[in-house]
Amino acid sequence: MCGIVAYIGEKDATPVIVSGLRKLEYRGYDSAGIAVLQNGKIEIRRVAGKIEKLEKLVDENPTKGNIGIGHTRWATHGAPNEQNAHPHVGMAGRIVIVHNGIVENYLSLREELIAEGVEFKSETDTETIAHLIEGFYSESQDLYTAVQSALKLIKGAHGLVVMSTEEPDRLIAARLGNAGGVALGIGDGEMYLASDVPAIVEYTRRLIFLESGQVAIITKDGYSVNDLDGNPIQTEVVNVPWDPISVEKGRYRHFMQKEIHEQVRSLSDTMSGRVDFEEHRIHLKTLNLDEEKAKSIKKIFITACGTAAYAGMVGKYLIENIARIPVEVMVASEFRYCDPIIEPGTAVLAISQSGETADTLAAMEEARGKGALLLSIVNAIGSQAMRIANGFISMQVGPEIGVASTKAFTAPLLDLYMMAIYLADLRGTLSVEKRIDLVKDLLTVPGLVEKALKKEDAIKAIAAKYKSMKGALYLGRGVNMPIAYEGALKLKEISYKHAEGYPAGEMKHGPIALVDKDLPVVVIATRDAWYEKMISQIEQAKARNGHVLAVATEGDELIQNLADEVFWVPETPWLLSPVVNVIPLQLFAYHIAAQLGLDVDQPRNLAKSVTVE
Ligand code: M6R
């Protein structure tokens, strides 16, 4: 879950690496470090804390060289202090490494190394790799083969970059399993490396993504990629279309706020190139489906984690309603432990912003192993979840930096809606009239989201009133039930307040006991098939002195009179209402956390891509 950046070329490596780490801080932010080869010596600067401390340190105590590696850490083994921060050096000081992943057998390796006389300076598992590589290096005098040999001994999933004093003209990078990506960025007489594209997209958009089991030798003029046995591998250069501006905060105080506001554009972008406005048809070419394949699908499993899993729950309603294919949703961390029944005709659809979430990738592997048709909806271009699927939908929303996912929640909602129409169309189960209506409805969404965003000031004022609350209960029904889960998750992850999302109808079976004057109840009560039931929910909460905050359709006087506060949203076709209804809940959580002065973009204990299981 850490971030890695490296550089080799003619430039001063330090600013390139440090600014790259800044862009990856969302991946981990408890400590950071950089190593640069300076006059044949490894110069290391490390800090406990955020990248700004590293920036200060390299200002006060500069490093200068044309080759270097850097790291921002999310601690797994060892406290987040300076000693445990990467890079880590081998005992003889000849090799230095940055690493993402967990060495599962590090305890036994560490004991063996200690028995051989190695002295450890940190509590990290990574340091074992540094010593192993250095041990092999003394035998082979070749960094590439030393890395190769060490990789064969370590268990687990890894992404790493290694540099040596003896070979100042090359970096070695490797990927084993799904501990996060390793991308090589091709420049002109220079090469960049990063665990994630935003770190280097300002310099180059020509990228190669290492697959598991690949080791790359990188010089300033090029690269070669081999498998673990040294066999050369042909790699594909991917042109990444991201705009570097989108990884800057612009006029917003936080990335999360910027990304919430970007949703008008990102929702249009996710539709772009997929909607035939004349025919009112959807085309999702990258799903690689034809009529025959689409007709053969008998069941879809949706698997994902966190916010992406809530998008999947909405997807169940959309696909079942529009395409009439049964859908089961399962969080990825459970998927492979339930021995899922995958029969001919089962498709497994993974949803992931990063495309590198370890649980989601493990679920995909389980599905592939059982012969499922593997599909994905992914944001990060070139990520593992995009590459290993038989077909995919790219969210097309640009990088999402805030740890709390917002635009990468709403885009897949539209993608799932489009996928449902596309599947139904291919299977011949959708009437022309219904298809036209569904596509027309789809096109109204960016405008409706824009209207919902215009209420930000009112939502900010409500947040000011409720920012001291201890927690909240979020209730929704039907297609908006997952929006209650998502609203609660947004609040808890950035404001550290306990919040629980609940299917509204389940209130009376237990949670209603919690309701009193101190527990705000957030109710999604827009005009849809469950509206009347939600009104009785509000009545029940009010009867117990609960404070009701309702997401309601503009002009709804009944709710205005019943609820204590109202988050107004424009009237929206019901299948698309989750996209609009989640907007005030994102803004409410954001303004509470911002007003409490919390670290909105990098909340404690979290990281943007969770590459550990
Ligand atoms: O990159 P992914 O979409 O696979 O990430 C899944 C979850 O880790 C992610 O949605 C997480 O729950 C977010 N912090 C939610 O805001």
Image (spheres, rainbow, N blue to C red):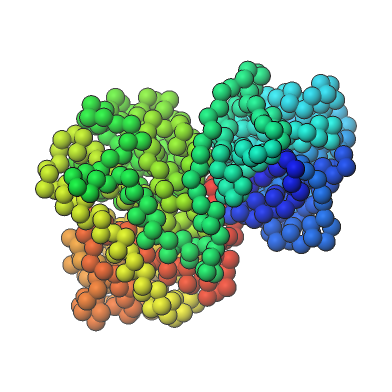
Left or right of residue 185, residue 318 in this image? left
Q: Quadrant of the C terminus?
A: top right
Task: Give the quarter of the image for residue 350.
Answer: top left
For image coordinates 50% across by 42% down, the residue present is: 240
What is the x, y in percent for residue 592?
A: 48, 72
Please name whichever residue, 521 or 61, is drawn nearer the observer in this view of the structure: 61
Q: Is residue 404 left or right of residue 516?
A: right
Of residue 44 and residue 18, the one placed in the foreground of this image is 18
Q: Nearer the viewer, residue 515 or 496?
A: 496
Residue 267, placed above or below residue 189: below
- Percent across and percent down for residue 569 are 29, 69
Q: Tell me, yes or no, if residue 264 can be seen here.
A: yes
Q: What residue is shown at x 43% (from left), y 61% (from top)?
A: 262
Residue 135 sits above or below residue 255 on the image: above
The residue lying furthest to the front in this view is 188
The quarter of the displayed image where residue 392 is located: top left
Compared to residue 448, the image places residue 437 above or below, namely above
* x 38%, y 30%: residue: 390
Total numbered labels placed on residues in the image? 0
Whether residue 124 appears in this view of the structure is no
Residue 530: image location, x then y, percent: 20, 62
Residue 106 sits in which quadrant? Answer: top right
Question: Looking at the image, which residue is at 63% across and 23% down?
Answer: 226
The picture places residue 284, in percent across and down from the top left corner, at: 31, 39
Of the pair 202 and 593, the residue shown nearer to us: 202
Q: Is residue 292 rendered to the left or right of residue 340?
A: left
Residue 572, compared with residue 164, is above or below; it is below
